[in-house]
Image (cartoon, rainbow, N blue to C red):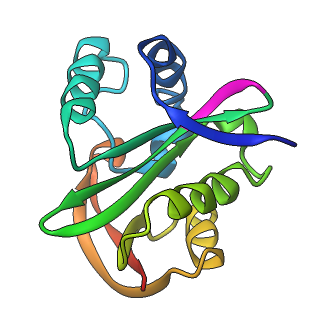
Amino acid sequence: MRDVTLRPIEDSDLDAVFEFTRDPESVRMAAFTAKDPDDREAFDAHWRKIRARTDVTNRVIVGDGRVVGTIASFVQEGDTEITYWIDRSVWGQGVATRALALLLQEVPVRPVYGRVASDNAGSMRVLTRAGFEKVGTDVGYANARNAEIEETILRLS
């Protein structure tokens, strides 16, 4: 993928976002997902809620002219965290790495945290390449796996 940019999310992006956030392999890898990724009503309610928050920077990732993911920073329990979701059709093409670099330029708050299912090697690489360091682990219930799993906590200072 040659061109990766970020822009504010628009209503017209949500159909594409819904589709790639319900891909079974992506859902399993992300682990900490909605209870039912196919529930469009819950998806729309979630997006209305987070788009209304003033402490969230929400961006759609555009790759070569099409929506290929989302990335955001948000405040949770006083800490700024990042999250992203990349369309599986572009995994391994550097999209997450470039999108994260762009978001970190836009959101200069430090420290910033990322959380990753500990077995999600791809996302772990994206964050560590961007300078995030492992600072701990936690165990939480992952809807996508119907089990408690380990999550690695990373920080960029």
Q: Position of residue 13 (x, y in %)?
A: 50, 18
Above or below: residue 135 compared with residue 117: below
The quadrant holding residue 124 is bottom right
Work out whether 33 lies above or below 62: below
**What residue do we see at 53% from left, 56% from top?**
103
Q: Quadrant of residue 62?
A: top right
Q: Is residue 108 magenta?
A: no
Q: Say which residue appears at 45% left-offset and 20% top-offset.
A: 10
The residue nearer to you, when weighing 12 against 43, is 12
Q: Residue at x 55, y 35 (%)?
A: 7
Question: To which quarter of the image does residue 110 belong?
Answer: bottom left
* Residue bounds of the magenta highlight: 65-69
Instruction: Give the main secondary structure of the magenta stretch.
Output: strand
Q: Is residue 34 left or right of residue 60?
A: left
Picture layout, residue 129 above or below residue 59: below
Question: Residue 61: image x %, image y %?
Answer: 60, 37
> With respect to residue 38, does 58 lie above or below?
below
Residue 88 is situated, as x and y percent measured from the top left of the image, at 66, 37
Q: In the depicted view, which residue is nearer to us: 34 or 4?
A: 4
Is residue 61 rendered to the left or right of residue 116? right
Q: Residue 113's spot in the image, x, y percent? A: 36, 72
Q: Is residue 118 left or right of residue 78?
A: right
Quadrant location, the C terminus: bottom left
Q: Quadrant of the N terminus?
A: top right
| Residue for point 35% across, 79% down | 111
